[in-house]
Image (tube, rainbow, N blue to C red):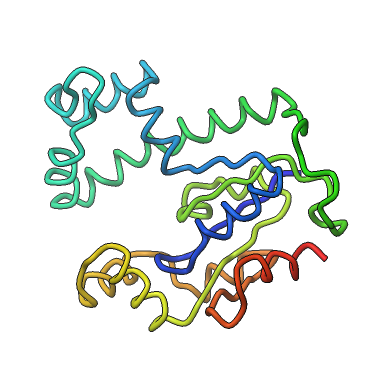
Amino acid sequence: MTIGITGGIGSGKSTIAREIASRGYRLYDTDREAKRLIVEDPELRAQITSLLGADVYEGNTYRTDIVSARVFANPDLLRRLNALVHPAVRHDIENLLNSKLSTKGCNETATLNSTLSTLNLIIESALLFESGLDALCDKVICVTAPEDIRIARTVARDHTTEAKVRARIAAQMDEAERARKADIVLVNDGKKSIPTLIDTLLL
């Protein structure tokens, strides 16, 4: 089974995903893997070079400072960049799924319910729905939290300002819409520890 985990900034989706992965599951972090593909996938690299210019690469270094300066001042350019990266990520995931991932190494003593008992892959993505990766998932978990908590977490984590975090939230999918699209909504408001939240999900 393939489980998608998504959520807005500061929701704690990455922490939830890592906790589940620590119990023996394969985790595909789309942010991390996209960064790998941008450098290692020859076709994607050529497409990005054509779109943004050869100077966005220095050897095997992807110059995110140059890329950010160009795409965030040009929403259409950002859209076109995402239209290159998202399919490459999806293709990479499909290759994993087609390889029939082994569950060797899973914690066989973990308590699982029927929803997650045959889980072999977790796809973590803030843009799970926007990129269409939800179509690859048997179940989607939306991790959510009250906005004030999400803002406080992100300010502390990124050493940024509340105004900047609010702007990032406004640019993301509406939290209520994301929750409606998901199969399971997990409220990560700090009232329960992460392991307890997962225990509740898996019992």
Image side of residue 41 versus residue 158, left or right = right
Q: Residue at x 58, y 46 (%)?
A: 123
Q: Quadrant of residue 68?
A: top left
**Image coordinates for residue 8, horizontal then vertical, percent:** 44, 66
Q: Quadrant of residue 27?
A: top right
Q: Residue at x 48, y 34 (%)?
A: 89
**Image coordinates for residue 88, horizontal then vertical, percent:** 45, 30
- Quarter holding the N terminus? top right
Image side of residue 43 versus residue 155, left or right = right
Q: Residue at x 28, y 75 (%)?
A: 166
- Quarter holding the C terminus? bottom right
Image side of residue 192 versus residue 43, left or right = right
Tally the marks.
0
191 over 5 or under it: above or below: below
96 over 24 or under it: above or below: above
**Image coordinates for residue 146, horizontal then vertical, percent:** 47, 82
**Image coordinates for residue 98, horizontal then vertical, percent:** 70, 25
Q: Residue at x 84, y 57 (%)?
A: 111
